[in-house]
Amino acid sequence: MEYTGSQYIGEYVDGRMEGVAEYILPTKTKYVGEMKDGMFHGQGTLYFPSGSRHDAIWEKGLVVKVSLNSPTWTHLEKSLRAVMTVEMASITRPQG
């Protein structure tokens, strides 16, 4: 799942990101939550540079349930590019 220029703070199991961790994208968007098999999986929160956040339940890198307590996304986070960046980071495997 690692995205070029990102930072991962957490444990690895069999070479894959696993457990509760922090994952910081090059855009400074930060995911804090559960990881499984190298992907966002379980309860986790995206923190955006604008100060907004997105609480959700993730399954294999994709949002399956949004928290009702999560504030509405700002215009910037609603952009297709921001969503694609988060989704790509959750499924891209490291090269090399």
Image (tube, helix red, strand yellow):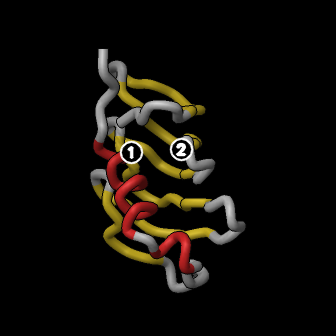
Q: Which disc, if any, is residue 47?
A: none
Q: Which residue is mark 2?
A: 25
Q: What amino acid does circle 1 point to?
A: Ala
Write the residue at 69% across / 66% down.
50
Callout 1: SS: helix
Residue 64 position (above or below residue 5): below
Residue 91's image quarter?
Answer: top left
Taking depth in this image into account, of 36 and 49 the one nearest to the observer is 49
Write the residue at 40% across / 61% down.
81
Write the residue at 35% across / 58% down.
84
Question: Is residue 87 shown left or right of residue 72?
Answer: left
Q: Earlier in the sequence, mark 1 or mark 2?
A: 2
Q: Which residue is mark 1?
A: 89
Question: Is residue 52 shown left or right of residue 95?
Answer: right
Question: Is residue 66 shown left or right of residue 37?
Answer: right
Image coordinates of residue 46 in percent, x first then y, are: 55, 60
Residue 3 position (above or below residue 64): above
Label 2 crowd (10 A; few <14 / some 14-19 / many >=20) = many
Q: Quadrant of the C terminus?
A: top left
Q: Quadrant of the N terminus?
A: top left
The outermost residue toward the right is 51
Give yes or no for contact between labels 1 and 2 (Cβ–Cβ under 8 Å): yes
Write the residue at 29% across / 31% down.
93
Residue 45's image quarter?
Answer: bottom right
Q: What amino acid does circle 2 point to?
A: Leu
Image coordinates of residue 34 in percent, x first then y, are: 47, 49
Image coordinates of residue 54 in percent, x first then y, are: 54, 70
Callout 2: SS: loop
Residue 53 position (above or below residue 89): below
Taking depth in this image into account, of 80 and 53 the one nearest to the observer is 80
